[in-house]
Image: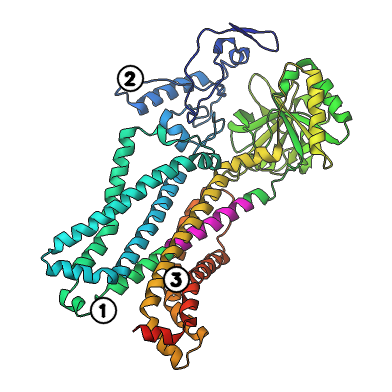
Amino acid sequence: KTITQNDGKVWEVSAVVKAFPAQSHLQFDMLASIANVKRLERRKEQWGSASVYTYFKVRPGTDMEALQSKLQTYVDGQLGDSYSGEGDYSSFPFQPLTSIHLDSNLEYELSANGNRNYVYLFVIVAFMILLLAGVNFINLATAYSITRAKEVGIRKVLGSKRDQISGQFFVETLLQVCISVLVALILAQLIMPYFNQLAGKSLSIGQVPLLTLFSASTILVLSLTLLTGTLPAKFLSAIDVVKVLKGATITKTGRNWVREGLVVSQFCISTGLIVGMFVVQHQLDFIQNQRLGFDKEQVLVINRASGLERQYEPFLNELNAMAGVEQTACGQSFPGKAFDSTIFLPEQPANYRETSLNYAFVGAHYADLLELEFISGRNFSPDMISDSTACLINETAADRLGWTDPIGKTFNRGNDDKRTVIGVVKDFHYRSSHHEVEPLILFMTSWQPSYMAVKLSGKNMTERVAAIENQWKQMAPKVPFDFTFLDEDYAQLYANEQKMAEVFTIFAGLALFIACLGLFGLASFLIKRRSKEIAIRKVVGATTAGIMGLLSRDFLRLVLIGILIAVPIAWYAMNSWLQDFAYRIDIQWWIFALAGSIAIVVALAAVAFQSITAAMANPVTRLRDF
């Protein structure tokens, strides 16, 4: 079968390959021979440029460092006298295929990358949430041990040994954990589509080999049983038979310290996650609302505009005549998209004899549409023939080169392609805030760039876009109309962080909910044990508010201790995360105050109902029960 391009070129299908899995970084609809790409033929001898992705398989046992050194020696030899400065100006570092998704963050990635640090972070958070549930189990199991004290005492009298009693409680815990893991697997399968939508993934439990899933589940069950069953089993099996059968209250030196320590750990984890949630969201707000140095609002970007071919200029003219169109511009790249780079030879004197710089070929109105601010010089003029060899640079490029007066300076791209600086624009964030603003050169284009931008006015955006699409279909009926908005393109630079914020919010809410469940159950039990004391206090004149304060005070103390422990740990963790951004917030004190306040309010709410119920109960009824 054949496939015909819109320019008439015919491709013949020679094979059909199995679809790559969705998680692969390499996705395609068709593969074609590289020998048919004329642009690459022209760039074969340009050793200052990298034009293709190169994959190769090495023999087992190959010394990768030696092989890479050998390749670099070859590249240096090919550079010849064109680049005679010190250092490597063209290099092609090796990268294992398996490290691309999680460990790479380079320009021109074939697909959006993940981040290994985020994977580790979510594993840690998931472990913390599991730990919270385990703490709840231990806390409530030991607290409610009094209800089974007589059972244990009678079993001991009838001859049960301590190991047998411990074994019984371990088996009970094992059954509970097994049921929990089974229910969790079912829930995971049901929730997975929603998680994939949130995280932008295509995961499923079916992707995990059955043996791996079974082994992991078994290890999880045994680990949880051991961790959560040891303390309750040890405590219950150590009960003093004589005291229990005489009706004495169970006490054990240090047990209250264990329980209080578990409550503190719960709110330490919960507060830390809340702090993390606020820091992530605050950083996202900062990078999305900081002054970018360009206007990204209501700018429509048409992708693959070069498909218009001869209709390129007529289409631009039609757009400029449309109602609601303020400005049009074209360019090889726009903020939020990848910018090319190559080696330039700047006019001397400069800080570098030759250096690699980012660049883009743009139309005359590129700076106008983005509303770039000029520090010196002027913008391109379509009426000046000399501007065909002109260029604009940003202020960082001028600073790095050491040019105090850049206007009139020249760059040479090789092959006698000399460009003259006519203007310097104020730095704008054409890449994400993970990176500092880098030097950039904008060249006046003499060809049709891939992207066309349209700045729109008014509120009827749907109608404006529909009109542009209709005009496109009239002038290029065989070419798909593919567009995005500039603010959306730029937001995609922070897609991972945005997803992280959403998942972090869910995790923090879940952790706080689990902690409060445990606190609610523990408060219910402890207040029940103090019901006689509460009744006597009411008889002798204690108010409802006074009793509520008495009952809440101990819990509030534990929550405050947990918050104090969480603050330095959370600060260190989130400050480390922020180091990944070249432009970042300072972690403010109010974030910790707000997180602590939320933890306190939620904790008090968890015990308030139990406290109010106990404080308002009829003391006569309570005392009659004893």
- Give the residue type that dot 1 points to: Thr
- The residue depicted at 58 percent of the width and 42 percent of the height is 495
Residue position for label 3: 559
Using the image, determine if residue 547 lies above or below residue 344: below
Mark 1 and mark 2 lie on one chain; the one further toward the N terminus is 2
Compared to residue 289, the image places residue 535 above or below, namely: below
Which residue of the protein is positioned furthest toward the left in this rendering?
A: 159
Q: Do residues under tags 2 and 3 come within 8 Å of each other at their CB atoms?
A: no
Q: In this rendered view, identify the residue nearer to me: 39 or 250.
A: 250
Is residue 550 covered in magenta? no
* Mark 1 to mark 3 CA distance (whole Å): 27 Å
Q: Element type at marker 1?
A: loop
Kind of residue sitting beneath label 2: Arg
Query: Where does the magenta region start and end?
Result: 269-285
Disc number at residue 59? 2
The reply to whether callout 1 and callout 3 are in contact (CB within 8 Å) is: no
Q: Position of residue 166 (x, y in %)?
A: 19, 61
Distance of label 1 from label 2 (alpha carbons): 73 Å
Q: CA distance from mark 2 to mark 3?
A: 59 Å
Prevalent SS, magenta region: helix
- In the picture, residue 363 is in which quadrant? top right
Residue holding disc 1: 249
Q: Quarter of the image holding residue 369?
A: top right
Alpha-carbon neighbours of circle 2 within 10 Å: few (<14), some, or many (≥20)?
few
